[in-house]
Amino acid sequence: MDVKELRALQAPLKERYKQDPESAMITARAEGVVKGEDIVCAISNKAGTTVAGLHPAAGGDGSKACSADMLMEALVACAGVTLKAVATAMRLPLNSARVIAEGKWDARGTLGVDRAAPVGLKQVGLTFEIDSPADSEKLEKLVQLTEHYCVIYQTLANPPKLESRYKAMAT
């Protein structure tokens, strides 16, 4: 896709969102099912079903998806698509790129081994390896804009208000 095609694709959306800001409010949704004897959660998505289970550091055998890895995958996917869209909009030639996300978490926290140990990812790093003839200034700008426009990056950088609720299932 070139910049002309990208702009043609996005122009009507941008106009609609300017005219009707409420139409730009998109709901992201995921649903998982927990049942049976195994400690797993099945998440249906457009690509099929992903079965998440315990990480080996928490007692899993490594055969199931890890939710922390899935979060890193979501960051990589969003950053990669955003990188390509921004490069296209900048008319910046991009031969290829690799996006790598790494997050650190302390298994002691999630297993309750040490109440002072944190639960959750406490350090997340994102690396962009870019093959492009563009100069380093343009590539730095590309990365800055990618970070700015990437939904998952910005969600992690500026966490939203998080709430949960319990609701009884109809049997």
Image (tube, helix red, strand yellow):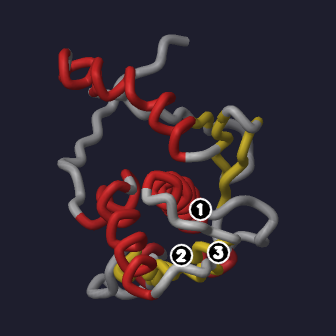
Q: Position of residue 8 (x, y in %)?
A: 48, 29
Which residue type carries mark 3? Arg
Q: Name the residue under label 1.
A: 73
Q: Name the residue under label 2.
A: 101
Q: Alpha carbon of mark 2 to alpha carbon of mark 1: how far?
A: 8 Å
**Res 98 quadrant in image:** bottom right
Above or below, 168 against 36 in this view is above
Q: Alpha carbon of mark 3 to alpha carbon of mark 1: how far?
A: 13 Å
Which residue type carries mark 2? Ala
Name the element at disc 1. Answer: helix
Residue positioned 54% across, 33% down in the render: 31
**Res 7 quadrant in image:** top left
Q: Can residue 116 be seen in this view?
A: yes
Above or below, 119 against 156 in this view is below
Name the element at disc 3. Answer: strand
Asked whether disc 2 touches disc 1, contact meaning CB atoms under 8 Å apart, the reply is yes
Q: Residues within 10 Å of mark 2 (few under 14, many from 20)?
A: some
Residue positioned 69% across, 71% down in the render: 96
Asked whether disc 3 touches disc 1, contact meaning CB atoms under 8 Å apart, the reply is no
Q: Mark 3 points at which residue?
A: 98
Q: Can residue 107 be seen in this view?
A: no
Residue positioned 18% across, 17% down in the render: 19
Front residue of 138/167: it is 138
Q: Position of residue 105 (x, y in %)?
A: 45, 81
Residue positioned 20% across, 24% down in the render: 18
On residue 107, the disc is none
First reached walking from the N terminus: tag 3 or tag 1:
1
Front residue of 84/8: it is 8
Which residue type carries mark 1? Glu
